[in-house]
Image (tube, grey):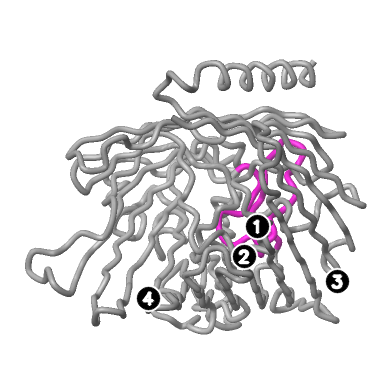
Amino acid sequence: MLLKFLLVLSLYCLGFTQGFAQNSPFNYSLELNSSVATKNTLPFWMTANKFGTVPNSNHSAVYAALFSDFKKPESRFSFSYKASFTGYLAPKKSDIFINELYGSLKFKGVLLDLGSKNEDIKWEGLSSSNGNIIKSTNTRAIPGINLKTDHYLELPFAKKWLRAKANYAEYFLNDRRAVDGARLHHKSLYFKSILNKKLSMITGMDHYAQWGGTSGEFGKQPSSFKDYLRIVTGSSGGSDAIETDQLNVLGNTIGAYLFQLNYTGNKTNWDFYWSHPFEDRSGMEMQNWRDALFGFFIDFKEPKALVAHLLTEFTYTKNMSGDSKHGIADDGSPIMARGRDNYFNNGVYNSGWTYFGNTIGSPYFTSEIPDSDGITHGVVLGDNRFMAFNIGANGFIQNIQYKAMFSHITYFGWFDNEYSPKRRQFSSYLEVKLPQMLQLPFKISLGSAFDTGTYRPNNIGGFLKFNFSLND
């Protein structure tokens, strides 16, 4: 039944876009794709960082979108929107779901997003985590409201050398979770310093906090306006919070510091970036300073070159503020320690830093397999301690565009139970876009990926995409 529905819907969308796009203010896109592999699952990079749209199995899928960009960039007020969905057929499960559904209002340099909107892809999509260790492009967009600056804004007291960018957002975690009805608070603040005509520096911080909702184990969590203010300010919980939240901070905090250097040259542009995670005071005070995502990106400013862009990354999360562990005193009270930060997991918010079964941060953090109720219980303990290298490049071989990524990951295991030998994984990805031939109304992309090592099954996969795009 779903197969017939997807087929009819695909043909309808294709005919609709061809028939009405020329006289419509809308933009349309339709993609048909199929993925297969030698195992029951797909290789790592065929599913990771795909905004949660690619199931981890052999499948055929359709992706459709209706959208409109900001029409008058020079105007003080403008509006954009998008609605997109994915439907797929797989041997064990077929599904259809919304990818993005949002409207955006822009007034001068301020933007208000309402709904589910994907993150902008940075560094040509070559980064393993979109340049941010805690917020990648690995999951579906989370619904909510986000007020942000559209770009870096000049500060009136330092127009020549200092600019700022910020956001303030509230989201609803509407997947199946250990804490039903949990909410997500997010804010960020970044400063851009203009060092000279060619060099600039960005420093800033992201702060997320899961709060509210009802836990099957711990009951209803604090959710009053006073509790919301505690979440916003990163304060400890009140008398109705569990004891650990009274001693530490209310809710589940996930944050990151960012440092970035940007160079603009005559023949190349390059960016160096550093993204450092924290979940408590020890991380905020840099006791886990070794843990971070380091990246270096080069734009050769020749879009049609053999290598147009090149990226290298190193990610390390083994330290976790040291080996000191929490405990229980003789009187039953908790003993708080500064160590074993256990990134992306939480005792109360047991689904951790995941959404619809995928890790919200770097996809190197492996999420647990959902239980029989469809609930994901965080990321695999011990697999959140790893070291990873990533190299990515794109460019053209004659008139064929390509994108390639090569990653090597070493997983160490948990402090008291480290893997021996360590689990190592090499994963690669190659995608090519064929030149449009014979004036066909679609573009063809194809590619392959493979995994080898001792962490995931040795696996080779391939995919084929047909993309129909009619813009006004």
Residues at discs 1 and 2 in contact (Cβ within 8 Å): yes
Q: Nearer the viewer, residue 341 or 433?
A: 433
Q: Where in the figure is residue 453, as x and y percent of width and height?
A: 86, 71
Residues at discs 4 and 3 in contact (Cβ within 8 Å): no
Q: Is residue 330 visible?
A: no
Camera-nearest label, 2 or 4: 2
Looking at numbered disc 3 in the image, what kind of residue is underneath it? Gly
Span highlighted in magenta in the image: 356-380
- Mark 1 highlights which residue? 401
- Mark 2 highlights which residue? 394
Residues at discs 3 and 1 in contact (Cβ within 8 Å): no
Instruction: Using the image, tell me which numbered label, if any, was put on residue 262.
Output: 4
Camera-nearest label, 1 or 2: 1
Residue at x-position 26% and y-position 69%:
191
Q: Earlier in the sequence, mark 3 or mark 1?
A: 1
Q: Where in the figure is residue 393, as x and y percent of width and height?
A: 62, 69
Residue at x-position 54% and y-position 57%:
136
Looking at numbered disc 1 in the image, what kind of residue is underneath it? Gln
Q: Is residue 68 visible?
A: yes
336 left or right of 369?
Answer: left
Camera-nearest label, 4 or 1: 1
Q: Nearer the viewer, residue 51 or 430?
A: 430
Camera-nearest label, 2 or 3: 2
Q: Where in the figure is residue 292, as x and y percent of width and height?
A: 52, 76
Classified by dominant secondary structure, the portion drawn in magenta counts as loop
Residue at x-position 59% and y-position 64%:
126
Q: Earlier in the sequence, mark 2 or mark 4?
A: 4
Q: CA distance from mark 2 to mark 3?
A: 25 Å
- Secondary element at tag 3: strand
- Secondary element at tag 1: strand
